Amino acid sequence: VLQRPVESQGSIDNWVTYLRSNTVKDLVRVGILSDESIGNYVTNSSYAEQAATLYDVLLDRPADTGGLASWTSEIELNGWTNAVDAFLGSAEYMNSFGTNSVPGAGRPGCGPSEAPSLSPSMFPSMMPS
């Protein structure tokens, strides 16, 4: 979501702890609503740019013309947070990523070769019994 490498092992450890009781989708929401994300993608951006960002970051695809126009208006009327929640709750998001996948997994900073090495013991509550 932030489209950058993680800053430290401590940060990884904190997110692993978070994921023990939350979904990846929850983590995506926290990331896109973070001060860093808002500073990078919302502040000083037009509503159309914000809508395009939602398509890019949350649906991992470019916006179609009709959707871009509709979501541009939606963000202007109801704000960034409402639009984020609508995207995360959409059938397209759920069908593509569900609750435990990250949109844009093939991007720099998100690929398997760049993921931290996590052992199964770090996720005892998430491992099948």
Image: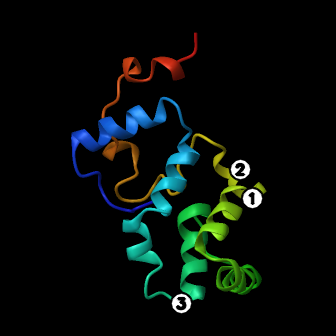
Q: Is residue 23 left or right of residue 14?
A: right
Pointers 3 and 2 in contact (C-beta within 8 Å): no
Disc ID at residue 94? 2
> Hey, what amino acid is under mark 2?
Met
Q: Quadrant of residue 38?
A: bottom left
Disc ID at residue 90? 1
The Cα atoms of the two marked residues, 1 and 2, are separated by 6 Å
> For mark 3, what is the residue?
46
Horizontal and vertical percent position of residue 2: 40, 62
How many other residues sit within 10 Å of disc 3, few (<14), some (14-19) or many (≥20)? some
Q: Could you tell which of marks 3 and 1 lies nearer the N-terminus?
A: 3
Q: Nearer the viewer, residue 115 or 23?
A: 23
How many other residues sit within 10 Å of disc 1, few (<14), some (14-19) or many (≥20)? few
Which residue is at 58% across, 62% downward?
58
> Hey, what amino acid is under mark 1?
Ser
Pointers 3 and 1 in contact (C-beta within 8 Å): no
